[in-house]
Every structure is written in structure tokens, then in C-alpha cells.
Amino acid sequence: MNRKASKPEQQRRFWPLPRPRGIRGGGKLGPGTAQDPDGIVAVAAEKRDRTCPQKQVFGGQVTVLDRGDEEPRREERGPRAGWSLPLVGQDFLEILSAWYCSFGSCGATGDCRVLNNVTGLESELNGQLHGQHLAGEVVLRAVRGFLQKPQPEKALVLSFHGWSGTGKNFVARMVASHLYRDGLRSECVRTFISLFHFPHAQYVDSYKVQLEKQISETTQLCQQSLFIFDEAEKLHFGLLDAIKPFMAHRDNKDQAGNRRSIFLFLSSIGGNAINEVALDFRRARRPREEIPMELLEQRLRRELLQPADGGYARSHFLEENLIDFFVPFLPLERRHVRLCARDAFLARALPYTEAALDEVAKMMVFVPKEEKLFSAQGCKSVSQRINYFLP
């Protein structure tokens, strides 16, 4: 029996455009896969598939999406019958949840979906993030300072930079899991992958409308929202027009209230510049812990100001003064890969030996070719490598 979609379902409607057939040539997406070791893409896809049925309502029409269609087809929306039990049940659950929260401690935000467990975030950054002392320090300091402000004047915007596999998605997942009860699956957390959610340049105007709607509804629904943009270097600069108002300084604090928003932009831009600094320190026999943040930020700014191809964002982030903190992710050495392998064994409750950790590290490709100092893939495929050691 057809029924009118409930309000939460309407708020979760997503893109009315053709679904891309895959990322970087397709392949299976899911936690632990080579394309998505931390599961962040899989969660985004799962959210969209769970909340985006084949028929989506926009205005007075229904957009019918077939997976093979190149263009959305529209049909007129007919009247819907009145009440149904699932709708009543959904309303009852919302009332019950609000009632339960009224008796419990929901933190400073008053929203039970928001945890803001900064202590837990600090502990996991220190214990699970290997070889990234600068990234861990910057993220923790930025998040803690932002959450301590009773009424922030703007959203917190962090820009993650580094090679693939160095921990950008890993840290984004940490932030989500310690700030929100349901982590990446929270309705207060939205994840966007540039080539996955915005694949067609000819649809940029439509993407802008839907992106603005998605961010606006999330900020209204939650006292504190988190938005993650992966592959941000491939984000079309036109989409910044939809994002900028939510990141900029607030003109009217009374109107904005005490709602907070955090934006994380994950990018490979600047990865080579960061690696060059790390390589210079290694060749000079200086520990990577001595690399100054100021030097890396200077190199990142210089690379971001380089002209971009294809109309992608890049220098617009600097020109619009949108970024609060740059977060550099250094290339990982062999010792860091071994630690990642150890964590992968422990996460699956599997026994391991030092020899097994060495074997996992040997399976990785290291660069430069002559010196073999840094893992070309970071720790991205380590969790798959330990399958060779299963009985």
C-alpha cells in the first residue's frame, strides 16, 4: 500500500540524478576493500541507497530513477491515501526518543545523537593513528577549541592533505565516531565523494541545489552537524557557492543560535610537497617529529594557489578564506606499516608474530625506488594483506 513519506524520510531524499556506476573504474565498495579501507565510501553509499528509493519527490513531480537511465524521467504525482501504521509508528518512535532524552544527560547540545567525546578522540588518535603526530595534534586542538566555544562565529573547516592511505579517511571516521553516537551513520553526519556524488559536470547547477538543500536540512535537524567531502580536489568550484554560506562568518548570531557545523575536506593536493619535506628531513637524519607545522602549511598554501584544471575548486578555498586549519598527513615509513598490520591482526582477534608483521610490510611498495623509505600506498591495503596469514 502506498503511503505518504514521513518527514524524516523526506529529509533524507538525495540526488535526483543518474547514479554513477562506480569510483575509479568501479569495483566492490565496502569496509576493508582496496578502494575503501575505512568504509567511509560504503557508508555514504549505504545511506543513499537506504534513503533514496527509486521514486523521489521534488516539487509537484516524482523523479523515477532507473540505474541505466542517462536522464531522470518524471511523472505526475498522484494523491496519496491518508494514515498508515508505519507512519504512526515512526512518529511514535520520534516522540519516544524525545521523551527518553528529556530524562537523560544529552550533553551541552541537548541532542542525544551528539556525544562530543573529545577524551575518546584523543585516546584513539594517540593509540591508533601512526606516524601522524602533526595531524593528530592539529585535529584535536581544532575540535576541542571549537567545541569549547559557547557560540562559534563560524563553522569549523579543516583541510586534510596527503597521499592516499596516510590516514585522512581514518581520522574523519574517528571524528565522526567520537562526536556522534552513530558515527558515520548518524543523521547528523553527511559524507560526499566528489566523483561519486557529483560525477557529471553538466549537472553542476542541479548538484548545487541539492547540496544546499541537504546541508540546510541537516543543520536544521541537528544542533551539531558534520560534513565530510572526500576527493575535495575534484570538487567543482561551482559547488562552493552552495557550501560557502554554511562555512562563512555569521552576520546574525541570534538567528544562527548555538548550532554548530564542522566541515572536513579530504584532498591529495599537497601530498608531493609534504613528502618532499619528509624526505629532506629523513636524508638529513633528522626525526620527522621535528618537522615544523609552519613549513608544511607554507608549502600547502603555495601548491593550493596553483591553477587548477577542469574547473575544480583548489585555490578558491584560500581565496575565500574558508579554511581554519591545514592538516598535513606525512608519508608512512616501514615501522608505521608494521603497526598498521599489528592493529589489523588485533582488530580481527588473530594471533601474529613479528615475522608476520615484517612479511606484511615486505608486500608493500616503497619509494623512492633507490631508498625505499615511504609506503606508496600508506596503510591502505594492509588489512587485506593479512589474509595471506590466515590458517
Image: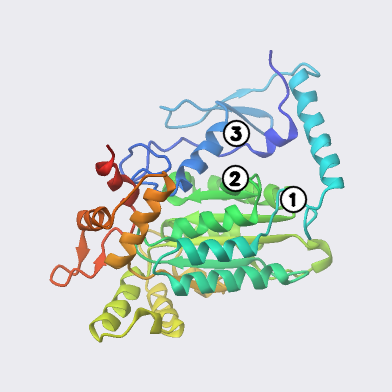
Q: Which image quadrant: the N terminus?
A: top right
Query: Is the residue marked by circle 3 packed among few (<14), some (14-19), or many (20+) residues within 10 Å?
Result: some
Q: CA distance from mark 3 to mark 1?
A: 18 Å
Q: Marks 2 and 3, how far apart in space? A: 15 Å
The kind of residue tagged 1 is Gln
Q: Is residue 251 above or below residue 281?
A: above
Q: In this figure, what is the number of numbered marks?
A: 3
At 47% from the left edge and 66% from the top edge, which residue is drawn?
A: 160
Q: Residue at (58%, 54%) from the top-left corner?
A: 176
Look at mark 1 in the image and give the residue it sits on.
220
Q: Is residue 177 above or below residue 307?
A: above
Local secondary structure at mark 2: helix
Amino acid type assigned to the residue bearing label 3 in the image: Thr
Residue 326 point in image, percent of width and height: 49, 73
Farthest left residue in view? 370
x%, y% of residue 128?
46, 61
Residue 371 vs residue 386: left or right? Answer: left
- Between disc 2 and disc 3, whose residue precedes? 3
Q: Which residue is mark 3?
A: 51
CA gap between label 2 and label 1 equals 15 Å
Classed neighbour count for the residue bearing mark 1: other residues with Cα under 10 Å, few (<14), some (14–19), many (≥20) = few
Farthest residue toward the top?
1
Q: Amino acid at mark 2?
A: Gln
Of residues 346 and 54, the one nearer the viewer is 346
